[in-house]
Amino acid sequence: MPVTVLLVDDEPLVRAGLRAVLEAQPDIEVVGEAADGASVIPLVRQLRPDVVAMDVRMPLMDGIEATRAVLRTVERPPKIVVVTTFENDEYVYEALRAGADGFLLKRARPAEIVHAVRLVAEGESLLFPASVRQLAAQYGDEGGNRAARAAMERAQLTEREAEVLRLMTRGLSNAEIAARLVVGTETVKSHVSGVLAKLGARDRTQAVIVAYESGFVAPG
Amino acid sequence: MPVTVLLVDDEPLVRAGLRAVLEAQPDIEVVGEAADGASVIPLVRQLRPDVVAMDVRMPLMDGIEATRAVLRTVERPPKIVVVTTFENDEYVYEALRAGADGFLLKRARPAEIVHAVRLVAEGESLLFPASVRQLAAQYGDEGGNRAARAAMERAQLTEREAEVLRLMTRGLSNAEIAARLVVGTETVKSHVSGVLAKLGARDRTQAVIVAYESGFVAPG
DNA sequence: ACGAGCCTCCCCCGCACGGGGGAGACGATC
DNA sequence: GATCGTCTCCCCCGTGCGGGGGAGGCTCGT
């Protein structure tokens, strides 16, 4: 069975572009389109797509609220890929926090867009795909994954969270961090959860990766 | 209660040096010395030290075998710090695989030696301590943790293990790696275990750290 | 023909991890 | 005084993770 996709973008041109790219694939099928976030939920219920490609900046209801709404109200919700123009779009981060499964740059090459859709359909996170890394390098990012760096910058970790993250990047367990900071393990878990949520990471390993990619810690 | 330490080194001079450094601390007590690996086990049973500072290169029984023997035959075994002269001592890696809790360079500054003993006594791993990082940088290591790099070089990962590690550094879970490589999750677990053992890492997070520190993967 | 190494998959098991809640204390801000 | 954010700690709960075994098939080299 093909991967079914619902496109959500206020610009018809973008929708057409995405449709052309995706429909060129035999295993991907665009089952619907929406021009604003408000019409997403009924369409999702009706069409039950595997993946929703959602613009972040839209009139009426933006991609963040739409993502939240879909995940909250639809059972067995689709995977949501946030589509954006800029790496440094602060809305992307909010959308990821809201539960989106990844993000996609509009200027990405067709093959990368297709790849991204397939990956999230398989249930993978798109926070650190090789394609994004290459893309970042391609557009003149010298050292450090721009996406990861943006995630860190806008994460606004508290002092304590930053300290916990630093210890995570040293390979310490929650219990070890607790001992080091002279607090309870529950407290550390609390901070770790905050770090994961703010970085859009699924587990401590991904958080450490973001830390390295963003330059929060430097190897060597 | 103070941290009790057993010194194991064939050179009396080194033992004296370690003793002098450690005994200068009010919370650390050297409870015994051994000149070779063979006499370690009875001494550990008798003295029940918190930490054993063990040379890797010794006559009769080297630090690797001694480490293995202690961990296998003694219940509630002490923490074991492997003492070595060179970062690139291949025996160190073997000792870590055998279950040692960390390693220590003989040319480390006294404060760092003391720090290391305290840390392992607290139950922390000494694979990635800041002191070692600083030390590596101090001795002209440009970019990349020398210890981590040495670990990677001598790990001799198989092709499959290297591929799995690469996917780990992209933040993928075992199930996701399995899907990507089209194998079972049990297979992935098997490879992950191999990677962890060979790198001397406790969990996938530490493995990813070693990968970054060694230059196995480069951020950006 | 035999062993060595690698890849593959299986079992059982304990536990750290992370999600989802809630809650009290403190300081800053309004 | 009230509100907000931070830090601290607590509960329950599911599961991914990693250790410990084992085992079969494969290729390669002797």
Image: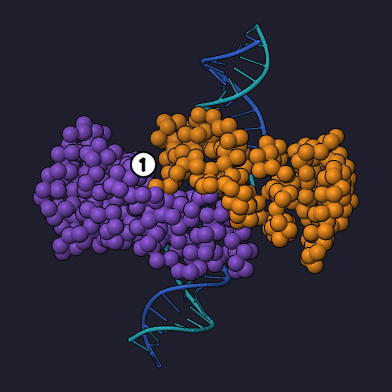
Chain colours: A purple, B orange, C cyan, D blue
Observer able to see residue A120: no
Question: Disc 1 designates what residue?
Answer: A130
Task: Locate residue A108, reporting x and y percent.
Answer: 24, 44
Q: Residues within 10 Å of mark 1 (few under 14, many from 20)?
A: few
- D18 to the left or right of C21: right
Quarter of the image for residue C4 reads: top right
Task: Locate residue B73, reporting x and y percent.
Answer: 81, 42
Quarter of the image for residue A86 reads: bottom left
Viewer-proximal residue among D10 and B215: B215
Q: On the rendered image, what quadrant is the N terminus of chain B found in?
A: bottom right
Q: Is residue C15 above or below residue B153?
A: below
For the point 82% across and 49% down, which residue is it?
Answer: B14
Q: Amino acid at mark 1?
A: Ala
Q: Is residue B161 above or below residue A16?
A: above
Q: Is residue D19 above or below residue A97?
A: above
Q: Chain of mark 1?
A: A
Secondary-structure class at tag 1: helix
